[in-house]
Amino acid sequence: MEKETENRIRRALEDKEPVTEQSVNNMILLARTSLNGSIRREKINFPGFLLAQIRYIGWKMWLAEFVVIMAPVFVLFQFLRWHTITQTTAVFLLCCLTVAISMLCIPFIYRSIYYQMWEIEAAAFFSIKKLLLSRILILSAGELAAITSVGILMSRYTAVDFKNSIVCMLFLFGALCNGLLLLVRKTEMERLCRYFLAYGFGLLLLMTLFARFLPRAFDGTFYRGIILGSCVLLGYGIYQGRMLVSCSEEMIYI
Amino acid sequence: MELRIEHITKEYKDKMAVDDVSLTITPGVWGLLGANGAGKTTLMKMIAGIMTPTSGKIIYDGIPIGALKGSYRDIFGYLPQEFGFYPEFTVKDYLEYVAVLKGLTKTGTKRKIAELLERLSLGDVRKKRIVKLSGGMKRRVGIAQALLNDPEILVLDEPTSGLDPGERVRFRNLLSEFAHDRIVVISTHIVSDVEYIANQNAIMKSGKIIQTGTTESLVKNIIGKVWRCHVPDGEVGKLEREVQVVNLRNEPDGTTALRYLANEKKTKGSSLAEPRLEDLYLWLFPQESGVVR
């Protein structure tokens, strides 16, 4: 029996008020719900579900992320003077890559609608909400790994401060994830793609403006502020993830 | 076991898709009949828990399905009208994917998939990509995914569209076998699908359930309204304009055998015929045959 249900039954029994038809019905409902939950058949858990998703979609996402990140890095190595890259340029570049990789999630998230799979996915045990969350988690893991690798590579071959690069990238990554989660919850799936693209380009534009007029934003001057902002975004992201799991399927896809 | 639908309504901006529907569904096969746009699919989606009613509730064994959450989905199987698949999936991949979504364990999945492939005659195509299968086979894959978790409630939206007559018969037999002690709801506008296997029928029109009951009790409503006759070929057109013709067949002697619906007989040689569910359906939905009584 769930702890919450147990507490509710305990409170109902301790109630000094006279027993009414309504309170008896509520008690029966609680007991039934609890019993029904306890006879659930054997199931895999969410981590198991998440791992299974890697087989179906994860490796494709990671492959796409790898291609997107390696292409500019290859260009940099081949045609630019890699060793002369400055702190501001390096962080700006990492931030641009973060946005570009996040944009990759659009086809993977839109997939269920495009191939008319969402109804079957929505009616299944794990439901479309957890499926969507698992896709966002897999994509985020790939994004973090890819960007960190490039960050490490840069700090090794250039004079770039790795810590500052990572913090800036995490902040932007948080902003992107929160934007995506908000859009998934609040807009129709068909509009989500357009809105998220617009959001991504908006962030890119904003960064370009910062790089042009306030380059100090990338060189570690606001290091602590950016850490604080990242923590706030992380907290908001966790809150949004929980909201996503508790909202109705209809809210997500229709 | 019972699924109770209590005063359910679904309202869109400009349309009432489901209008104050109440129904108690008990174990057995239930046929949900209605013309296109009657609200069947919306009702199915609400039963599946993927659409929230504007008002009213759906209660399974005394508990609203919203409160049951995972445990309701655990015992639920659903085949939507528009059945999709990812193009890279083979039949086996697809069933494994849905099994993961349904939270089945690896051992359970393997056994169940083998069993379903066998029962639905999909064994030979298990390694074939779904995109390359015929419409009927795709539908069978859809039915297989709905049965994967051994559901206690099975909801099938237009399950037989695209199936050939042989497949249709096999499907009916499979369902009849499966429905023992379980709830099976089939939404369709193909009357013959439910005529033979449904224990109970519910007929929907303009978002409302207008009639419920067994096939025998429903067809009683049109006793004395179904006629058959033979008319010369030249008179068929005239009769078609006056009454609702259920079917007609050209005879070798230059006449046409007709079955039609009317409150009273329209030709001299007409005699009353035994009513069927299809007759009732056309009586209730005259626009389906293009005739307005």
Image (spheres, helix red, strand yellow):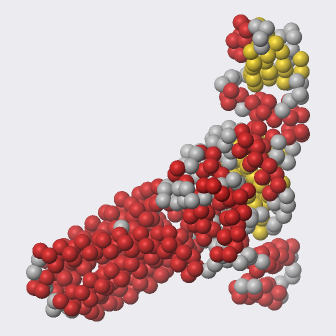
At horizontal 75% and vertical 18% (from top left) the residue drawn is B249
At horizontal 16% and vertical 78% (from top left) the residue drawn is A77
Which image quadrant for residue A164? bottom left
- Residue A8 in picture, x, y percent from top left: 74, 84
In the image: residue A122, left or right of residue A179 = right
In the image: residue B17, left or right of residue A75 = right
**Number of numbered labels in the structure image:** 0
Most foreground residue, B36 or B177:
B177
Residue A65 in view in this figure: yes
Q: In the rendered view, would you say B215 is above or below B227?
A: below
Q: In which quarter of the image is the N terminus of chain A?
A: bottom right
- Residue B96 in picture, x, y percent from top left: 60, 67
Most foreground residue, A88 or B64:
A88
- Residue A142 in picture, x, y percent from top left: 39, 78
Q: Furthest residue to the front?
A: B124
Residue B59 in view in this figure: no
Which image quadrant for residue B36? top right
At horizontal 43% and vertical 65% (from top left) the residue drawn is A108
Q: In the rendered view, would you say A77 is above or below B141?
A: below
Most foreground residue, B101 or B275:
B101
Q: In the rendered view, would you say A103 is above or below B247?
A: below
- Residue B89 in picture, x, y percent from top left: 52, 60
At horizontal 75% and vertical 47% (from top left) the residue drawn is B170
